[in-house]
Amino acid sequence: MKLVFDEIGYWTEVKLDIIKQYATEYSKILSNQTNPQFHHVYIDAFAGPGKHFSKDKKHFVPGSPQIALTVSPPFRDYYFIDIDRAKLGELKKFASVHGNVHIFEGDCNEKLMTDVFPNVKYEDYRRGLCLLDPYGLHLNWDVIKTAGEMKSIDMFLNFPVADMNRNVLWRNPENVDPAEVNRMNTYWGDETWREVAYNTQRNLFGMPVKEDNETIADAFRKRLVEVANFQYVPNPLPMRNSKNAIIYYLYFASQKPVASNIVEYIFKHYSDFRG
């Protein structure tokens, strides 16, 4: 089957630029640390083929794996995961020439826990920058929580609010497919999202009133701190489509204030932009 590359718009290119900026600063800081010396790695859980077709530029642009591999100073190791064999075949064309690249085919919810996170232990002076960028609700809360509890990982996370609104957060929640509810529970970690997404008021038809995107996103930010145990989680950056509708929020989470400060500075640059 011929590989069809993703066509990306303005805000996806913004996300890639944010990753490049932070990854560069992160690698500089960790590479200059000598007492103790750290072994820092880059992790991409939904790596894809490594490049995308830009709708605006009308040509291919580097994806997050290519961007990470060009960061200077370089990371010590790179871990790329994808469930799509065709995409990994394309990725291997340029990534496999690097001896410190580890590529895994399969569900990242399993591969991260068994093959990647064990290589980024805090007590082994290892640190990791992890990109969790699913297209929808395809991520387990256990992965997010484990990353926070490890104390060794900085994380960028896609919070897919468009998928949530389209398939789960309906005005009449009783009509939602149980399979979609299960996807939401798996991503959120439990069913407390119901308490966040709907207030106790009722409209004229007796239906619960759904909260807005910002309320739900802020509740998840607090969850990253209070439940996943990340110390610093700045306000996420809303990412939009060509109609200016929010399709997801880009979160950053870390254990270090300097990391949070860097990302807040980067986010601020794009916070008032419109694609």
Image: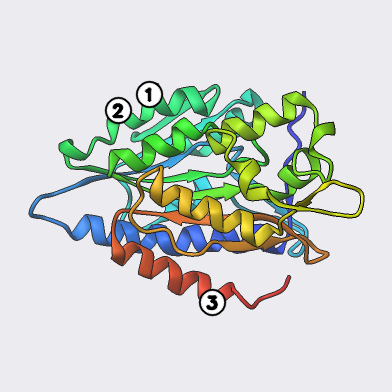
Asked if the residue at tag 3 contacts the one at tag 1, i.e. Cβ–Cβ closer than 8 Å, the answer is: no
Distance from Cα at disc 1 to Cα at disc 3? 36 Å
Q: Position of residue 18 (x, y in %)?
A: 51, 63
Q: Residue at x 37, y 34 (%)?
A: 146
Which residue corresponds to the image point at 66% horizontal and 47% vertical from the top-left?
160
Q: Is residue 13 left or right of residue 118?
A: right
Counting from the top left corner in percent of width and height, residue 113 is at 40, 26
Q: Which residue is mark 2?
A: 118
Q: Residues within 10 Å of mark 3 (few under 14, many from 20)?
A: few
Q: Residue at x 73, y 32 (%)?
A: 3
Q: Are marks 1 and 2 in contact (CB under 8 Å)?
A: yes
**Badge 2 or badge 3: first in the primary sequence:** 2
Q: Earlier in the sequence, mark 1 or mark 3?
A: 1
Read off the residue under disc 1: 115
Q: Which kind of residue does numbered mark 1 sit on?
A: Asp
At a point 73% along the width and 70% down the height, the residue shown is 275
Which mark, by number, is residue 229?
none
Q: Quadrant of residue 22?
A: bottom left
